[in-house]
Image (cartoon, grey):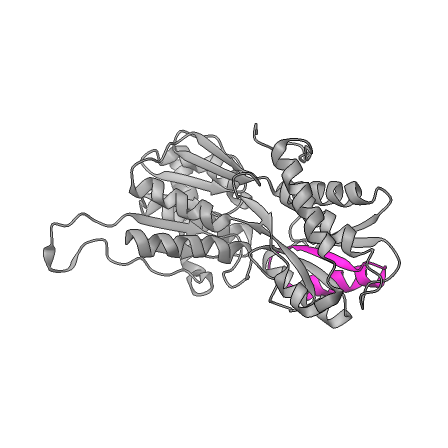
Amino acid sequence: MMKRMMSILLMLMLVFSLTACSGGSEPAASTNEGGSDAPAKTRVAIVFSGNLGDKSYNDSCYAGALKAQEEFDIELKTLEGTEAAEWEANFLAVAEEGYDLIICSSSNFEEYMKEHCANYPDTKFAVIDTTVEGDNIVSVSFAQNQGSFLAGAAAALFTKMSDIEGVNDENIIGWVGGMDIPVLHDFYTGYEQGAKYVDPDITILQSFAGTWNDPLKGKELTLAQYQQGADVVMNVASGTGTGILEAATEAGKYAIGVDLNQDGDQPGHVLTSMLKRVDSACYLLIQSVVEGTFEGGSKQYLTIADNGVSLTDMSVMKEALGDQFPDEILTKIQELQDKIVSGEIVVENYEGFGPNN
């Protein structure tokens, strides 16, 4: 008990020292003005392993929370952090504050949840993008391998269109991730399968930036892949990914966005985006607490068939290319999607991922 208390005190001291850079919003008062007997609002906290404003994963999660706040009138607090020490400190801070629901936005919180959630049995916890066992935990993960399969196939089809400006006659594509963690390997596993389904001999370049928050690093890695012959590079890097998309415009090449629809971020240079409905996951988790349907110890796995992942309709690229846009890509992607849903194509997972994990 003493060890646990010392750990909590140390973490709270750290989070107070980091308040200025956390970006967190203070919770509204939980009681109503005038001493009303109306029930207190449901209190929800979200801890992020990165910053808002990434136009990707974190912003998608936050969008779902804002929708829930508007519809259910919840009290919402967010805490951002870019380093492991901040993540644990923020997690412990909101756990000690007694929120009704604490949402851990990514797999970066997995070890802290395993260590601490059982110490707060009256608090409901949720984690997105991984599975953590616990009677007061709900886990939501995605078949990002299926979505990435479609993205890889699209990249492999597009790199053959050498009549389009910026596309060479080499069959080389790229992929740049943020942190080197298992969930990103699940992304890459699907991307590689999709590309090789189209062209077994295609070359795929892979790089990890080692961070979610360094656009310059993302740009550097992407430009290097373009110099090695890649025409299309997929972004799976949250805030680092803005640099990946910028590199596409700078080099006169192409990229694939991730999580949110990033097609319009660099118009004419983002072929498509792999949508990952983190917003829906966050919204549904909050709704379950508000409506009393939260089931601790459960897990959800959202696939293409569940509308958990998909590609955009490429309308921005179609407008940019005009008559040069290869409509056969859309036809082929729809065909592949239907085959995944029917089970004719089974996309493999990275070890430890999938509906049974």
Q: Quadrant of residue 231?
A: bottom right
Identify whether 69 is placed above or below 7.
below
Q: Quarter holding the N terminus?
A: top left
- Write the residue at 41% across / 36% down: 117
Q: In the rendering, at what x and y percent does residue 115 appear?
A: 47, 35
Q: Nearer the viewer, residue 249 or 209?
A: 249
Magenta extent: 212-237
Q: In the rendering, at what x and y percent does residue 260 appear?
A: 55, 56
30 to the left or right of 68: left
Identify whether 78 is placed above or below 194.
below
Q: Nearer the viewer, residue 326 or 245?
A: 326
Q: Nearer the viewer, residue 224 or 343?
A: 343
Q: In the rendering, at what x and y percent does residue 42 appear?
A: 28, 47
Q: Quadrant of residue 264?
A: bottom right
Q: In the rendering, at what x and y percent does residue 355 appear?
A: 56, 31
75 to the left or right of 62: left
Q: Nearer the viewer, residue 312 or 136?
A: 312
Residue 219 colored magenta?
Answer: yes
- Write the residue at 44% across / 63% down: 23
Q: Quarter holding the C terminus?
A: top right
Decide if residue 311 is in sight here.
yes
Residue 61 colored magenta?
Answer: no
